[in-house]
Image: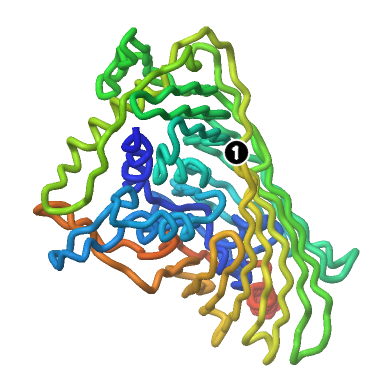
Amino acid sequence: MKRIYISILICLLPLIAGGQALKGSYFSEYSVLRNKLNPAFVPRSSYLGFAALDNLGIGVTSNVGMSNFLYPSGAGDGSLLTFLHPDVSADTFLNSLPSNPHLDIDVDTDILNIGFFTGKNSFWSIGLGLKVDGEVNLPKELFTFLKLGAATDPQVYNIKNTSIIANAYAELSLGYSHDFSDLVEGLSVGARVKFLAAIGRADLRINNLNLRMASDMWQVKADATGYLMAKGIDVGINEDGTFSHNLNNLDYGQLGLAGMGAAFDLGVEYRLRINDFFDSVRFSAAVTDLGFLNFSAPAVQKFVTSGDVQYVGVKDFEVGQDFDFNETVTEITDQFKEFLNLKEVSAGKVNSRIRPQVYAGVEVPFLWNRMSLGLLYSAKFGYTSVRDELTLALNMRPGKWINLGVNYSMLNAGKSIGWILELIPRSGIGFFIGSDYTFLEVANLPMGDMTLPVLPVNQLNFNLRFGFHIAMGNHYDDKGMARRAAKEARREARRG
């Protein structure tokens, strides 16, 4: 049964992908990207982005990494030992773990993005995109059990709050931002409404797991609930615990939306004017993705644990030249299904919230707004826990058409360096590229005759996001209005 949980770690690695917007763009003035973080922020020009080219990225955040679970064998052939191997001491492994190991996944891509001005103080945005999010929580007590096993005969473990959750949906959004400086100098507010279409959701939560381990048998009693919510996928459970439907054989005639929902983004910014050198101190706050999804009853399947399960022990294994990845994953997956002992029960419609995020920032420009220092607090309210982070950013604006920035994040995701480069012309092709988490130490993972790509040695925190857009100018900014006034004056002169 030790292999059961190894499968979770191994099978999730290919899901690495990241989304939303770069936190490093929060203080990039006139950035197109940062409007996603705070709808009160306004770019310098109208814009158009499409075909997933204006906002595309990969990434993952976690408080554990490869070095927590794989260790050099010392054989000199590059092979690695899993944390289960007896040559890896329990103290070495357990002391390296945080109290709540977790992995967060966020994927989003924009299919269409439009932003335009309808007056000097009014900005609108329209967006169409896809999102996938997920989170995995594996308590440290679970790894204590995996490593120590039956330290006494019998040994009892109580493991709580284990969860694997993934969500996929499309969103159509309409946003509006208004500058209220005519009433309160420096005040801008913004809001965005999102119409959500649910594609699917998988939700497995093991609330409580009691393990009694003896020399001849393991007894397992679990309190677990699972949901699969998707159209065209009907997964039943046979008496032997195997699935009665192959997920590769979808019912394409029944594919469709699993439900509908809505969400809101709200934001505010206030600029306290100082002088020309310091420009203004800028305070801002926002909440995004405050909403829900309602899954229709025909798309919902519910599974619960039924009775107790008994196992005999399984052997340890090492990752090296003789390690068969596919065979091991298959064996582990089969044991995992048997271990859960899930049975399908009737279920109706299900309401589920999505994951809101909160931002609060302060920025101090200097050198006539050519540079600034910013401090951003962000918090993601996940399905089972809250991930918060503090980011210190240095931003440089050598010209109105370019933003450069470096930042340093701490708290939930540990400590990591980020960066961003953004080209923001008034008209023409705009471009950005950046990362909130850049790992500095990497290693390859040997798997028999193959080697997995470079992976972070320590915490598995990394994203890379880039995109293009077409800037279409702004008739309502000072330069645009001056040009219009000059053009009108020439017309009047010709008429005279």
- Which element carries disc 1, helix, strand or loop? loop
Image quadrant in which the N terminus is located: top left
- Identify the residue shown where x is 78% and y is 78%: 281
Q: Residues within 10 Å of mark 1 (few under 14, many from 20)?
A: some
Furthest residue toward left? 449
Inspect the image, locate mark 1, and give the three-letter code of the amino acid beneath it.
Tyr
Q: How many marks?
A: 1
In the figure, 354 relative to 337: above or below? below
On the image, the x and y values in percent for residue 283 come to 77, 69
Residue 142 visible in this rendered orientation of the protein = yes
In the picture of the structure, the residue carrying the numbered disc 1 is 383
Rendered view: 449 above or below 366: above
Q: Which quadrant of the figure has residue 180?
A: bottom right
The residue lying furthest to the front in this view is: 153
Residue 11 percent location from the top left of the image? 32, 41
Closer to the camera, 97 or 92? 92
Q: Is residue 174 visible?
A: no
Residue at image position (64%, 66%) is 390
Residue 486 falls left or right of residue 224: right
Say left or right for 293 vs 304.
Answer: right
- Residue 163 in the figure: left or right of residue 193: left
Q: How is the image coloured?
A: rainbow
Instruction: Please name the residue shown 60% across and 24% down the image.
Output: 294
Residue 256 against residue 317 in the figure, above or below: above
Comparing 344 with 429, the one in front is 344
Q: Residue furthest right?
A: 183
Give me the residue at 46% from left, 55% from top.
Answer: 94
Quadrant containing the C terminus is: bottom right
**Image location of residue 135, percent across then percent down:** 50, 42
Q: Is residue 299 left or right of residue 319?
A: right
| For residue 444, above or below residue 308 | below
Q: Nearer the viewer, residue 229 or 238?
A: 238
